[in-house]
Image: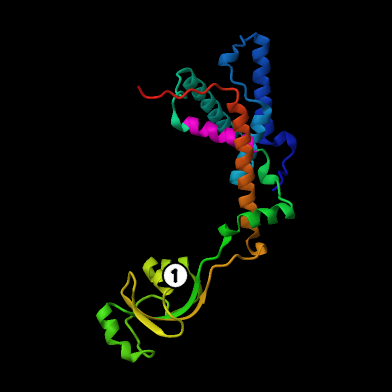
Amino acid sequence: MANSQPFWRQPLTHFMLIGAAIFALGALRGDPADNNNKVVVTFAQIERMAAVFEKTWGRPPRDEELQRVVQDYIREEILYREALKLGLDVDDSVIRRRLRQKMEFMTAGDIELTEPTEEELLAFFDKTREKYLTEPAFTFTQVYFSDESRARAAKGDLPNAVGDEINLPRRMADADKSEIAKTFAAGFADALEKLPLNEWSGPVISGFGAHWVKVKKKSAPHTPPVASVRDRVVNDWKNEQRLRRQDAAFQGMAASYDIEIEAPD
């Protein structure tokens, strides 16, 4: 929401004017300019802090809130510099990993804003089509029993056997293998692939007990049309381009280094 306050009444204006006055006063007094121990908070930085505050809280910061944000920035900057003086960044795996991530982000460039042409997308899809294969899918009905002996005793009652009560679906239609595994456990989903169509089979053992199962339809894995997985293919294409850019940038940097790997004695 736009800020309707007049310019001279806005907290950011107050804070910037106070900061400017303090800065000017320091200049008139001839304060020593030790760049190593000087923390300068620019107006642009203050504006960014105020913008972040407003985005987070849905309103501009009040004077005292903006002062606290700036003071926290100053505290962070001072502690950061002192940590560097103490060498706390050296041999720190977390810092090394973060710096590596930032370098890789920089070398990837604007790949997130880059879109493949239709030709590039189709070529990438053709090259990696196995990655987009669908899972096997099944339509089936099942009757559950708490143990295998009870299931075998009920064979003669099929297809009218009621089974034991449990919170499992009696029927699933066009359910893929991973969905079935989440519901009945992996062993049950694997067993469906081996069962014949349109006849009661079992007992099939799951993580819950025993089941009589009638498979009515099986759908083999297949490659879907690119339109149905377009977003996924675009993301995968961008990821491949990102890795290529990062590797090319790294190879260019590594070329200027002499690398020696010591062998054990």
Query: What residue sits 40% from the left and 24% below the top?
Result: 263
Q: Which residue is mark 1?
A: 180
Query: What residue sits 67% from the left and 63% below the top?
Result: 227
Percent coordinates x, y for residue 152 in the rendering: 28, 84
Instruction: Answer above or below: position of 190 versus 243.
Output: below
Instruction: Answer above or below: position of 42 versus 101.
Output: above
- Tag 1: Cα neighbours inside 10 Å, few (<14), some, or many (≥20)? some
Percent coordinates x, y for residue 224 in the rendering: 61, 65
Prevalent SS, magenta region: helix
| Apparent side of residue 21 relative to residue 100 in the rendered image (left or right) | right
Q: Is residue 139 magenta?
A: no
Percent coordinates x, y for residue 20 in the rendering: 68, 22
Secondary element under disc 1, as helix, strand or loop, is helix
Q: Quadrant of the C terminus?
A: top left
- Is residue 62 visible to us here? no
- The magenta stretch is 95-108
| Apparent side of residue 261 relative to residue 230 in the rendered image (left or right) | left
Q: Give the residue at the far left of this rendering.
A: 149
Query: What residue sits 37% from the left and 82% below the top?
Result: 201
**Number of marks in the image?**
1
| Apparent side of residue 93 relative to residue 61 in the rendered image (left or right) | left
Nearest to the observer: residue 29 or residue 178: 178
Disc 1 residue type (three-letter)? Ile
Image quadrant assignment for residue 159 = bottom left
Query: What residue sits 33% from the left and 69% below the top?
Result: 207
Image quadrant assignment for residue 225 = bottom right
Instruction: Answer above or below: position of 46 versus 182.
Output: above
Nearest to the observer: residue 56 or residue 217: 217
Q: Is residue 107 magenta?
A: yes
Instruction: Answer above or below: position of 160 versus 217.
Output: below
Percent coordinates x, y for residue 45 in the rendering: 65, 30
Image quadrant assignment for residue 24 = top right
